[in-house]
Image (cartoon, rainbow, N blue to C red):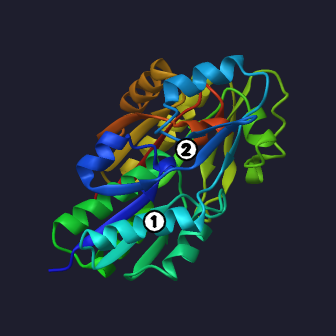
Amino acid sequence: MQHIGIVTDSTCDLQPAELARLQVAMVPLTIHFGDEHSRDWIDLTPDRFYAKLATSPVLPTTSQPSPAEFGVVYQSLADAGADEIVSIHLSAALSGTLQSATLAAKSAPVPVRVVDSKRVSQATGLIVKEAVKARDAGADARGVEERALEISATCRLYFLLDTLEFLVKGGRAGKAAGLAASLLNIKPVLRVNDDGVIEPFKKVRGRQQALAALAAHFAEDSRENGRMRAALLHASCPDGARDLENAISAAGADVEWDSHGSIGAVVGVYTGPGAVGCAYFPIG
């Protein structure tokens, strides 16, 4: 039986302790507050990040891991007995992280299958968890890769922001860049599309209406495609996540909750505080 290593990056927004339990190696991205550099989820937890963001005179930036950083992890897994590795990462349309992983894979001591999740945050986390289930059920590297790609193709990620300021200034707004966000109290519901690009889904006046619109779409999706496994995500806004969960329940969605999780520092650089959303896929 093959020994399969699984690697992801910190933007899956799964806590280090959970990744350790799942036996998944994580390569962190880095957050820069001026000359101060911190590794996502390792040096800078979400709570510390959002507190710092509220008082920092400079807008933070982020950087992807280098191929060498991936190379160290791939070598470590090979040394620990991995025959092959499946490396699952955030959308290539949002970061060069996948490119670094791909470059490192070319010189890795064992074969590495690099997967573009076409998603980010808890959506990538759901994909990683399904890959782990496939591995633990005895799938070979190809089977683990295929399961990750299958969930990537059916996983949906919707979210709403308090402001588009962070997304636009960070250069990650994608097709949402032209939204008239300056209009009073407009709360756009955004999604990450099948190409891994952020785009507008609906423009709604007011946060409660935006939550209701997202919940209604979730419920309609579950009526059409069956029971959903889902994760809630929030940027220092647990009450907002609970409001979204309640709205989804009230809309009549058929849902099995996998987790409620924080948006980590790297993703939070672009969402800003107050973001809430959900990721889900049909259980089948």
Q: Residue at x 23, y 68 (%)?
A: 135
Q: Residue at x 42, y 36 (%)?
A: 232
Q: Residue at x 47, y 39 (%)?
A: 41
Instruction: Please report whichever mark, 2 or 1, sits nearer to the chain's N-terminal start.
Output: 1
The amino acid pointed to by label 1 is Val
Q: Residues within 10 Å of mark 1 (few under 14, many from 20)?
A: some
| Residue 250 screen position, x and y as percent | 38, 27
Q: Nearer the viewer, residue 52 or 92?
A: 52
- What residue sits right under mark 2 in the picture? 158
Q: Is residue 121 above or below residue 71?
A: above
Q: Is residue 133 visible?
A: yes
In front of the other: label 2 or label 1?
1
- What residue sits right under mark 1 in the picture? 72
The amino acid pointed to by label 2 is Tyr
> In the structure shown, which secondary structural element does the residue marked by tag 2 occupy?
strand
| Residue 264 screen position, x and y as percent | 52, 37
Q: Nearer the viewer, residue 94 or 198?
A: 94
Q: Nearer the viewer, residue 151 or 143?
A: 143
| Residue 154 shown left or right of residue 200 in the figure | left
Q: Nearer the viewer, residue 242 or 26?
A: 26
Q: Residues within 10 Å of mark 2 (few under 14, many from 20)?
A: many
| Residue 67 screen position, x and y as percent | 57, 68
Quadrant in which the N terminus appears: bottom left
- Marks 2 and 1 sit apart, C-alpha to C-alpha, by 34 Å
> In the structure shown, which secondary structural element does the residue marked by tag 1 occupy?
helix
